[in-house]
Amino acid sequence: MKLGIIVNPIAGLGGPLGLGGSDGLSWLAEQGVKGPSYKRAVSYLSFLREALISKEEGLVEIFAGEGLYGHQSLAEARIEPDVIVECRSSANLCSRELSVKMADEGVDLIIFFGGDGTAFDVALGSNNKVPIVGVPAGTKMYNPVFVLSEHHLLELLSLFIEGETEIIEKEVFLVDEELLQKGVYKIIDKTTCKTVHSERKMLFQDSKDLASTIDEEELMGIAKFLEEEYGFPLKGSWIIGPGRTLQKIVGFYGFTKGFLGFMGISDGKVVCHPCSSSDLARILTEKEDARILLSPIGGSGFLVGRGNKELTPRVLRLIGDKSRILIVSTKDKLRRIKYMLVDTGDAFTDSLLEGYTRVIVGYYEEMVAKVLSSSKTDKN
């Protein structure tokens, strides 16, 4: 079996910096900067190491992008690739060029590390010649080609090697970044790709649900509840997460918030927007009354780890009491998801967030939902 490994080394940098994505940061890769995707690649590949090197000799032949684009991550995971694939393009086009070359080399599967932009590039480059599987390591990951966790990737790889999977076609899309900031989810380009499927287990996250509705009356009820019970948003300190639900709620009080990123409010005044992970850490450290407002992503159900990378494990541990996190959702969105998932990249931090929790769904209306680490669910 020939396995391709592609790492977009600067994917995910936009998250902790409070940016909507990493597309404008490609020059950093040329400076040798390693983003969160690089670290996640090392972590995942280290987890896969035994599966990749303990198989009978010659069973898995590894093709890796040169340098930061795959080879260095493998080296840190103590895995030696069989073939180094060169990239002659600029940094922002390397993922596409590498997937073209690997497809031409006849690899059987490409595993890439990045976000939605990387997914689209690899889908275009592979040109339906070879199945692709994504590891969520970017800022935005709304597409359905990303595995849920390293455990799911290991299982997928084992099933694939044993011939117990099938190849299916999925759509990969790009959204208009400017409109997204305004809460309008508009697909501006899409393509199809081959990926892996198992009848026995759901190994991938679901794509973002565009069908769930926004009930203005429900949202106004949620806002009124937060105002009466917690003084939102004019009293105390608030960290408001990304998404259309929270954008609408804070908008009722005259605040103009982008769809992506966090907004910090203290006693009715904006203290950061968009907020970096350092901004969030400062608010949580300086303001003991600070609360975080979050809403799960429709479809995939992710509460932490997709689209809100500003919530690093360090920031989350500063929260202390879980009651400082308030979760809101429309009833329609919550009914469409089985669990609310977390994927912080740190197992201990994931465990701190797990368990049954209340979700505010209207004016003095709550539902109970389960928060689960993405590594612990098979989605059955």
Image: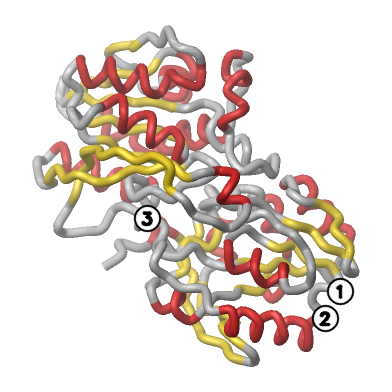
Furthest residue toward bottom = 364
Q: Which of these two is toward me, 23 or 81?
A: 23
Q: CA distance from mark 1 to mark 3?
A: 35 Å
Tags 1 and 2 touching, CB below 8 Å: yes
Residue at numbered disc 2: 231
Numbered label attached to residue 234? 1
Q: CA distance from mark 1 to mark 2?
A: 6 Å
Q: Amino acid at mark 1?
A: Leu
Rendered view: 21 above or below 80:
below
Q: Secondary structure at mark 1?
A: loop
Numbered label attached to residue 207? 3
First in residue order: circle 2 vs circle 3: 3
Q: Position of residue 13 (x, y in %)?
A: 61, 35
Q: Residue at x 44, y 40 (%)?
A: 116
Q: Alpha-carbon neighbours of circle 3 within 10 Å: few (<14), some, or many (≥20)? A: some
Tags 1 and 3 touching, CB below 8 Å: no
Whether residue 347 can be seen here: no
Q: Position of residue 240 (x, y in %)?
A: 71, 63
Rendered view: 194 above or below 78:
below
Q: Alpha-carbon neighbours of circle 2 within 10 Å: few (<14), some, or many (≥20)? A: some
Q: Secondary structure at mark 2?
A: loop
Q: Position of residue 352 (x, y in %)?
A: 59, 65
Q: CA distance from mark 2 to mark 3?
A: 35 Å
Q: Alpha-carbon neighbours of circle 1 within 10 Å: few (<14), some, or many (≥20)? A: some
Q: Which of these two is toward me, 329 or 70?
A: 329
Q: Residue at x 72, y 47 (%)?
A: 277
Q: Amino acid at mark 3?
A: Ser
Q: Amino acid at mark 2?
A: Gly
